[in-house]
Amino acid sequence: MAAQRKVIITCAVTGAIHTPSMSPYLPITPDEIAEAAIGAANAGAAIVHLHARMPEDGRPTQDPDMFRRFLPKIKAASNVVLNLTTGGAPTMAIEERLQPALQLKPEVASLNMGSMNFGLYEMLNRHKDFKYDWERPYLAGSDDRIFKNTFKDIAYILESCSANNTRFEIECYDIGHLYTASHFLDRGIVKPPLFIQSVFGLRGGIGPHPEDVMHMKRTADRLFGDQYQWSVLGAGSNQMYIASMSAVMGGNVRVGLEDSLWIGKGQLAKTNADQVSKIRRILEELGLQIATPDDARAILKLKGGSNVNF
């Protein structure tokens, strides 16, 4: 009998898209982020993807000292793979966004494969009351904001972290981003196996239609063959059905409150673990096996949790 395929679940714990007033369950403080990450790992996530926030008002921050306030707690309590953002927030310069991955040397860091419009302004139609002064202008200004990651920026991040042996969650928000990843593979700046995270349903990127998902997979297969692992994230209400599509198509999945605040229609998720548990149930009903952190390390050829700087 053939072995069951092992699916890697990534959980993105807090992110920079949603603001604190959108959900009382969004982790903000270092202790809340640590607790959320450990809970997601206990529920079945092999990887947790981490941003940091200022504890007094939830503003996104890339200060490595803020990451140091929760990373050791997670590492002490769990074997989960820790994945740090280089995306930060669209309002940040690249040098600022790079610092956590550069200084803390994680097993995995995220990396967006291009500059793009990043429209969050439609969230103002759904959320009227904001607790902190920065939230409304942060969302409203996104109709004239570009997330900047040029070819030079991408090379700068990859080359700056090359000595750390950090691998990258290569985030592709559109088809052209796959070709950019292929370009850096051809240049030898990234090494296989690539961990391609296809993102669906964010304003400014590819849509969430099943044809979009299939087109992403077909293109990645053609460009990378057996040199990559595919994963998906669906934004908002797209989260679970796009994850289910990926699993059926041979891919991995990402959930978490960074990508969606919801667990069902009109129902806020109270924890990241709620979403991990839900997708785990779906995967196991499909006859798939959940990858452990060490499975993920073997599949992605990671350097191991003892070789980080925290």
Image (cartoon, rainbow, N blue to C red):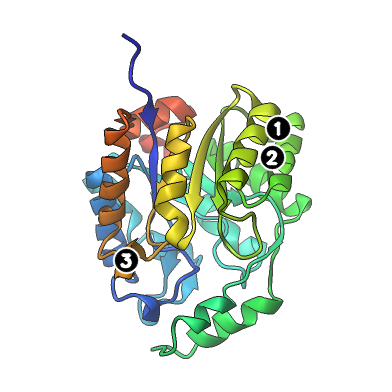
Sooner in the amino-acid sequence: mark 1 or mark 3: 3
On the image, which quarter does residue 140 sit in? Answer: bottom right
- Badge 2 element: helix
Q: How would you rate the neighbour count of disc 2 (Cα within 10 Å): few for under 14, some for 14-19, many for 20 or more?
A: many
Give the residue at x 38% y 56%. Answer: 256
Q: Amino acid at mark 3?
A: Pro
In this rendering, the answer to whether 145 lies above or below 186 is below
- Judged from the image, the secondary structure of the residue bearing numbered disc 3 is helix
- Residue designated by label 3: 30
Closer to the camera, 134 or 94? Answer: 134
Q: Position of residue 284 (x, y in %)?
A: 27, 34
Question: Considering depth in this image, is 201 or 306 the residue closer to the camera?
Answer: 201
Instruction: Name the residue carrying label 1.
Output: 185
Q: Residue at x 47, y 52 (%)?
A: 84
Element type at marker 1? helix
Amino acid type assigned to the residue bearing label 2 in the image: Ala
Q: Could you give the CA–CA distance between mark 2 and mark 3, rounded to whole angstroms?
A: 33 Å
Q: Is residue 22 left or right of residue 180?
A: left
Front residue of 214 and 24:
214
Instruction: Name the image quarter holding the N terminus.
Output: top left
Q: Position of residue 223 (x, y in %)?
A: 70, 30
The amino acid marked with disc number 1 is Leu
What separation in Å lies between label 1 and label 2 (alpha carbons)?
6 Å
**Does residue 118 appear left or right of residue 152 in this picture?**
left
Whether residue 230 is visible to the viewer of this picture, yes or no, is yes
Q: Is residue 138 left or right of residue 35?
A: right
